[in-house]
Image (cartoon, rainbow, N blue to C red):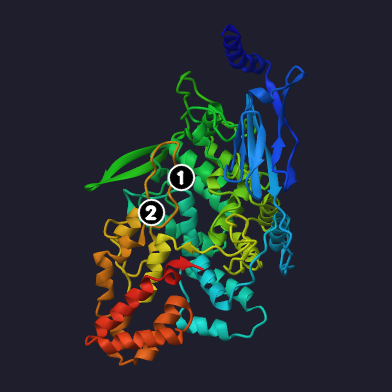
Amino acid sequence: MPRLLLGILLGFLLPQVLDAQSVKRLEIVPAARTLHGPNKKQQLAVIAHFSNGTRRDVTHLTLFTSSDPDVATVNSRGLVTFSRTGEAAIQCRFSTLNSVRLTYVDPQPDFRWNNPTENNLVDQLIFSKQRELGLLPAPPCSDVVFLRRAYLDLCGILPSPDETRRFVESTRPNKRGLLIDELLMRPEHADLWAHHWASALDLGFQQAPRRGADYLKWMSTQLARDAPLDRLAREIIAGRERVVAPGPVSLYTDAYDAAEAAARISEAFLGVRLQCARCHAHPHSSWGPMDWHRYAAFFAQIQRKSFRIGNAVVWKSAFDSTGEWVHPESKKPVAPRFPGGDFPKLKPGQDRREVLAEWLTAPTNRYFARTLVNRIWLHLLGRGLADPPETLHEFGPLVNEALLDALANELIAQRFDGKQVIRLIMNSQVYQLGTQSNKFNKDDTRYFARGYTRRLRPEVFLDVLTRFFGSPAPIDGMPLGTRAVQVLHAPPSIYFLAISRPPRLTECDRERVRQVASLEHLLNDAAMQARLAVPTNRIGRRLAQNWNDKKMLDEVFLIAFSRLPTEAYYKKATDHLAKQKDRRRAWEDIYWAILNTKEFQYRP
């Protein structure tokens, strides 16, 4: 018993004694390595290098964690065991933190690489990784699938019947690339991607929905003018309030306080959840509480104040050059310092946010460029190279770090023109892969060996419904015809949209559920039934124009699916129409059936 007690005491005290010598770094042996079956195990050793020049094997004192336990597990002694092909980062914590990436490949004797066409660097780097892991990419998608993807990803709408016919019948050799260029110039693109960036900043403007719409309009205008993303970020970070005139309303009005605004910016533009280190060491990175306080000190000069205009309470962000960030324990002012960097040289009364914005958006700041391209990739491919994007610079393996760096270099070379990166990704074979699975890619959910179908974003789905019905849905406080992606606040009248934006739960729990609320909420909603029955919607207009059933069915299929119906569906629809005395009601049934298909509800 005394021996056991001594062991426990040594296990508790030895790390603290060693830590007192200051651990400079942890060395992990072996470094990044690829294992090949049947060998599924790898023993790790952890060597601590101390400030006095000594080093010690601390494997038995190290806390090990696997980034993906479904792929690999690690025990308390550092023995890693893989269960299937894939990659995992093994986190090793002893005083400080380090990690190693391990890859396991279970060779399949009948695997034969199919040498897919490589259009650009995206294909070169993604296909190289797939070949290494024994993943066989799907064949290219059809023109119809590409058309729907491009419209939904770039503009948040579906093509009209005329646009579908023109594209499918076109014989231009580079018609897909030309379509991408056309869509990037449309106003719908600027509106959708303004909403993407606003979502990254977690904007809501719950108390002032109209001002939120003004903020989106300002962002959309900047994107339509091809404003570089670094300039846009600088204006957002250092924004000053304009209370009356519409324009770039500061995000500091929407955030509860300066700390929340600081946290949103670190997630959106740094790919780091720094606020998780506010009270304790970040569990998946080397950030500590002091890193958070020194970063948050850049925002100490901003305060959120309320005032009245008539009967309404309006929030305003005010700048105070004397503001200081006070440490909650020492009660002393904290000097700002760049995350992972140096202390800035500040002039008296200077707005610290401007200094932070210049540092953050500098081409030499890899955090910024990598974070932006990861978010662009997420919007186009359905999941990021690091996912969720707020964890980009935390513990865990990237799907393809070489590609992330290459895209970041491209964004910098293009002077932060986001459209150039979008073009590069969408013109790749990877973006244009079909969704077909095969023996070698059926389990892939990370490495983009096939197209991943996904539910439409709630705002996009509502905008798609508007075109499908041929009549706009009213949004409280906004002009008729306003798109759902043009507003940030979900009005109570649009119940489906409101429940699709779950609130934040705690200070350290900022990851919202990234999915549409159950479509049962929408499809069984009384408002949806009412939209089907609007006398002047598409059904009503076509019946008033005496369109025959075939012409009506062709149109609704082209709108909903960008294709004509099959002969089997022609017969099914004709039989249903023949049985119903009320032609209008019969067509409402057909529209309802289309709404309930996965093909309509999902991005292909």
Q: Nearer the viewer, residue 453 or 343?
A: 453
Residue 140 drawn at (x, y percent): 63, 72
In the foreground, 370 or 581: 581
Q: Which residue is mark 1?
A: 511
Q: Which amino acid, by three-letter code, is at mark 1?
A: Glu
Q: Which residue is mark 2?
A: 212
> Do the numbered discs 1 and 2 sit on residues whose CB atoms are within 8 Å?
no
Decide which of 334, 452 is in the foreground and name it: 452
Q: Please give the label number shown on residue 398.
A: none
Residue 380 rendering spot, x and y as whole percentages: 56, 61
Residue 386 screen position, x and y as percent: 59, 49
Kindly tell me whether residue 219 is visible in this rendering.
Answer: no
Look at the numbered disc 1 and give the secondary structure of its residue: loop
Mark 1 Cα within 10 Å, few/some/many (few <14, many 20+)?
A: some
Q: Residues within 10 Å of mark 2 (few under 14, many from 20)?
A: many
At 78% across and 19% down in the image, what residue appears? 53
Q: Residue at x 59, y 31 (%)?
A: 337
